[in-house]
Image: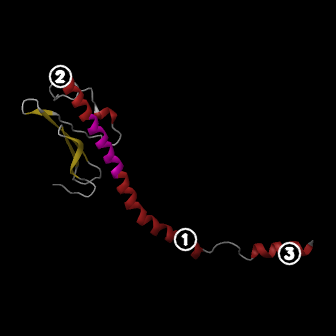
């Protein structure tokens, strides 16, 4: 029994843990992996935010088409359409939606914009009655425009 106790004591004193160098190498590997992953995560997050703009602009389109079906004109007032995107949004807090009739109430154009990152470039979307899918005029993800 005494021999077993002395072996246990010797093992605990032998330094069965990790050295500081080994721990620092593991931390450095994690930092390098994180530095590659973070830009991708930010890009995917911004694309998710842009999907909110597409969904809400499609809601404007549906509301306008329904209003046109009932009244034979497009509305220039989002309140008449019962569409309030400021109340419904999670990411796009700075919505500017303008629906205005052109060519004697035959068409409408709706636009919205917001700043996805903190630069001076804004993400701008446009929707018309001719095209159901919103068009990204100025893309804030890669700072490009027409």
> Do the CB atoms of the residues marked 3 and 1 lie less than 8 Å apart?
no
Disc 1 from disc 2: Cα separation: 67 Å
Q: Residue at x 92, y 73 (%)?
A: 2
* Lower position in the chain sequence, tag 1 or tag 2: 1
Disc 3 from disc 1: Cα separation: 33 Å
* Lower position in the chain sequence, tag 3 or tag 1: 3
Residue 83 percent location from the top left of the image: 27, 29
- Crowding at dot 2, Cα within 10 Å, few <14 / some 14-19 / many 20+, comes out as few
The main secondary structure of the magenta stretch is helix
Any magenta on residue 84?
Answer: no
Q: Which stretch is magenta?
A: 46-59
> Do the CB atoms of the residues marked 2 and 3 lie less than 8 Å apart?
no
- Crowding at dot 1, Cα within 10 Å, few <14 / some 14-19 / many 20+, comes out as few
Q: Residue at x 22, y 47 (%)?
A: 135
> Which residue is under mark 1?
26
For the N terminus, give its image quadrant.
bottom right
Q: Is residue 78 above or below residue 119?
A: above
Q: Which mark is residue 131?
A: none
Q: Is residue 7 left or right of residue 137?
A: right
Any magenta on residue 50?
Answer: yes
For discs 3 and 1, the disc positioned in front in the rendered view: 1
> Which residue is under mark 3?
6
* Lower position in the chain sequence, tag 2 or tag 3: 3
Q: Is residue 30 left or right of residue 22?
A: left
Q: Which mark is residue 71?
A: 2
Residue 119 percent location from the top left of the image: 25, 54
| The image quarter in which residue 20 lies | bottom right
> Do the CB atoms of the residues marked 1 and 2 lie less than 8 Å apart?
no
């Amino acid at each position: 029994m005494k021999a077993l106790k002395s072996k246990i004591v010797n093992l605990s004193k032998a330094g069965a843990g990790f050295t500081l160098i080994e721990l620092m190498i593991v931390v450095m590997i994690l930092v390098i992996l994180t530095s590659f992953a973070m830009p991708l995560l930010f890009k995917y997050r911004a694309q998710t935010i842009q999907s909110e703009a597409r969904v809400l602009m499609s809601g404007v389109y549906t509301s306008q088409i329904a209003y046109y079906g009932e009244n034979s004109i497009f509305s220039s007032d989002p309140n008449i359409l019962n569409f309030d995107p400021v109340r419904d949004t999670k990411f796009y807090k700075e919505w500017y939606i303008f629906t205005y009739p052109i060519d004697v109430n035959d068409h409408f154009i709706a636009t919205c914009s917001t700043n996805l990152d903190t630069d001076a470039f804004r993400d701008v979307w446009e929707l018309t009655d001719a095209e159901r899918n919103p068009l990204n005029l100025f893309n804030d993800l890669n700072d490009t425009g027409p």
